[in-house]
Amino acid sequence: MARRPVRLRPRLAEVAKRIRGGVHADLGSDHGRLLRHLLESSRIEHAIAIEINVVPWQHSRDALSGLSADVRHGDGLAAIEDDDPIDSLSVCGMGGKSIARILTRHPDRLPGHVILQPNDHSEAIRRWGLRGGFHLIDEARVGRKRRFEVLEFRRGSDRDPAYEIVAGEGALDEEVAIHFGPHFIRRRDPDWLAELQEQREYLEALPARDKIAEWRYRAIELLLAPHSPESWRA
């Protein structure tokens, strides 16, 4: 009797539904739950789990025992071999800046499909995509008490079309799209707009705003403006 796929928390479930193929690698696999789910639900044929720390590596090895999985103890993409036929890669549950550094170290070992779930600093991930030749094909927000973002990339050969956002007669500043997400800006979901409103109220209440806070406040004002054009939408 086949085992029922392990249940995932919403942030990992959002990652999992974007993965299907032959071989998938997960960096920082921890307990191996994502890879186990992908294997048990037949979304992938083989998994490669990579963990730099011994205890999480042991957890992944135990969780994936008996499944078609290769559990490696190594430092990020350095553990990927040149002849590994990897179709997709995920990195979840780390800071955005750390993820970007990991992906930048060995760009030649990246597959064409990358799914990332940073705990913070999503702008660092988007900036990596722009600089590294990966198109941001979609992004999602999950969670209630704490929001997590899931960003999906595919390798591209030209400028990422996601950032071709216009505002009136001029272009929306690319930095705004990098920080707030081009797909979020286009969709303008009610919960995203409500969160922006909360951030604006917080920034307005500050007795003084430094340069960064002032930039963010002005960007949010632009995004919440009633005249935000329909052309931003998907």
Image: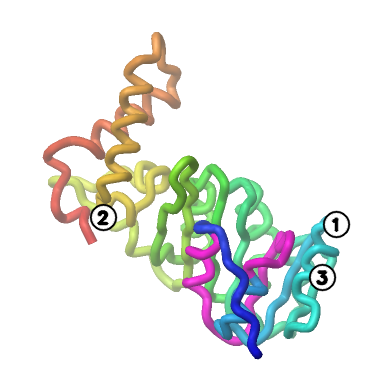
Nearer-the-camera pick, 218 or 41: 41
Range shown magenta: 12-34
Element at label 1: helix
Q: Secondary structure at mark 3?
A: helix
Element type at marker 2? Answer: helix
Q: Residues within 10 Å of mark 2 (few under 14, many from 20)?
A: some
Give whichever of discs 1 and 2 has the lower sequence position: 1
Q: Is residue 145 above or below residue 132?
A: above
State the quadrant of the C terminus: bottom left
Q: Which mark is residue 119?
A: none
Q: Amino acid at mark 1?
A: Val
Alpha carbon separation for disc pair 1 and 2: 41 Å
Q: CA distance from mark 1 to mark 3?
A: 11 Å
Q: Residue at x 41, y 59 (%)?
A: 139
Q: Is 31 left, or right, of 93 in this rendering?
A: right
Position of 116 relative to 205 (above/below)? below
Identity of the residue drawn at 33% across and 64% down = 161
Q: Which residue is mark 1?
A: 55
Q: Is residue 200 left or right of residue 93?
A: left
Q: Which residue is mark 2?
A: 187
Q: Quadrant of residue 105?
A: bottom right
Query: Local crowd at mark 3 within 10 Å, few (<14), some, or many (≥20)?
Result: few
Are circles 1 and 2 on residues that touch, CB within 8 Å?
no
Quadrant where the image shows the N terminus: bottom right
Vertical placement of residue 199 versus 227, above or below: above
Q: Residue at position x 62%, y 46% from top?
A: 95
Which residue is disc 3 drawn over? 62
Q: Is residue 112 left or right of residue 141?
A: right
Q: Earlier in the sequence, mark 1 or mark 3?
A: 1
Name the N-terminal-most of marks 3 and 2.
3
